[in-house]
Amino acid sequence: ADRQDPKPLAWRIRTHRSLGPTLAKLHATYPIDAVFIVNPDPWIMRDCRNAASRLRVPAYHELTEFPDVVALPGSRGKLERYYLERWHLPALAGTMVISTALEKYALERGVKRVALTGPVVDPQFHRDLPALSVSDTLRIGYAGSLSQAKDGVLHLLEATRKAADLLGE
């Protein structure tokens, strides 16, 4: 389900109605050992946890960002974070995280088991970078979200402007 769907209630209702029966049908053909939840939406998480419980398999979740950083704006985001922290995380069999800070966050919120995976990057798919060359031209590089709230891109651009001024560029 796409959280950016212009009709969010419609996809939630479709997911709510179809998730349990779809997993049960799949489980009848290909036994499911666990349910891994990646969508932080509280309705979806509840339905996934309930479906896992009916199948008598554990439900896990992944945390690759702090929930307050990627939360939707306003009261809806606060409510989703509340449900995640108070109801869903403590009820999960475990969670997978990519940093020790997220590991601490999950454990403090009652997650039973936390697996620290580290950043999910497979180095076999990346060639060695050429050696850096030094020049007198100011250059910046950035790879990440263009979200100010999440990664502070505007701060990076402002710092670059200040550096350029200081360097006379």
Image: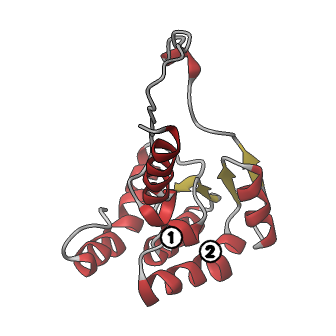
Q: Which SS class for mark 1?
A: helix
The residue positioned 50% from the left and 70% from the top of the image is 45
Q: Earlier in the sequence, mark 1 or mark 2?
A: 1
Indicate the position of residue 65 as horizontal and vertical percent values: 57, 58
Indicate the position of residue 137 as horizontal and vertical percent values: 43, 26
- Numbered label attached to residue 32: none
The residue positioned 68% from the left and 40% from the top of the image is 118
146 or 119: which is nearer to us? 146
The residue positioned 51% from the left and 87% from the top of the image is 79
113 or 22: which is nearer to us? 113
Cβ–Cβ under 8 Å for marks 1 and 2: yes
Say which quarter of the image contains residue 110.
bottom right
Amino acid type at mark 1: Met
Applied colour scheme: secondary structure
Horizontal placement of 88 versus 154: left or right? right
Q: Quadrant of the N terminus?
A: bottom left
Say which quarter of the image contains residue 89.
bottom right
Q: Quadrant of the C terminus?
A: top left
Amino acid type at mark 2: His
Work out which residue is located at the far left of the displayed protein and give it. 6
Work out which residue is located at the far front of the displayed protein and give it. 168
Q: Which SS class for mark 2?
A: helix
Q: Which residue is mark 2?
A: 88
- Numbered label attached to residue 45: 1
The span from disc 1 to disc 2 (Cα, nearest Å) is 7 Å
Horizontal placement of 23 versus 65: left or right? left
In the image, residue 158 sits, relative to residue 48, either above or below, namely: above
Number of numbered discs present? 2
157 or 104: which is nearer to us? 157
Indicate the position of residue 133 as horizontal and vertical percent values: 52, 13
